[in-house]
Amino acid sequence: MNKELEKKVADAIRDPKNIGEMPDADAVGTVGNSECGEMLRMWVKYKEQDGEKIIDKASFQSFGCETAIAVASLATELIKGKTANEAIELKPEELSGELGPLPPMKIHCAELVQGALRSALSPQNKENKKESLAEPDHELSPTLKDSLNEGQSQSEDSSLKIKFLDE
Ligand code: FES
């Protein structure tokens, strides 16, 4: 990683935005990268504006590298005010935009963020089963750590569904 990118990542993770679970989220998505072992979970909350359902806020938790955390922080700010379809269309380089071009070995970090976002926004995701804007579903928002601990203590029918990006 070049010095300029290192500095931008360091700046972004010094004060990451929107980190942590979101108890009243409307949707959640979790992805993992089986190569590097990093995992990322994103929560999304919608609101109605001018008759359209747009993203009100988003948050994330990560067992990821610093670049993934920096991109997730930027992405959760970038998608505010967008519709789910607009956010799904965002490419990794758009999500990591403020950091500048990522070196080849770090592109998958932005793809991890894109994957978690698409997982949360995708209507067919089993995790993302909440349709209503009212009645928060607290089962949607365990912490990533809680889910992993739960998954380790249960047998194969664990409720934690992690989508590995390269499968
Ligand atoms: Fe794998 Fe960054 S090194 S997500």
Image (cartoon, grey):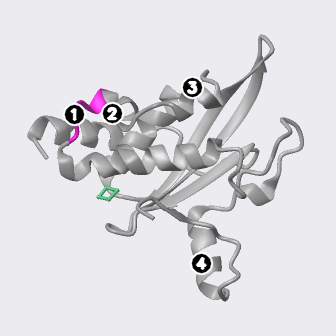
Which of discs 3 and 4 lies nearer the camera? The answer is 3
* SS assignment at label 2: helix
The residue closer to the viewer here, 157 or 19, is 157
Q: Which residues are magenta?
A: 98-102
The disc placed on residue 93 is 2
Q: Quadrant of the C terminus?
A: bottom left
Disc 2 and disc 1 in contact, CB within 8 angstroms: yes
Residue located at (57% from left, 73% from top): 148
The residue closer to the viewer here, 33 or 141, is 33
- Whether residue 16 can be seen here: no
Q: Earlier in the sequence, mark 1 or mark 4?
A: 1
In the rendered image, which residue does mark 1 sit on? 101
Query: Can you tell which quarter of the image residue 52 is in?
Result: top right
- Marker count (numbered): 4
Q: Earlier in the sequence, mark 2 or mark 1?
A: 2
* SS assignment at label 1: loop
Q: Disc 4 residue type?
A: Asn
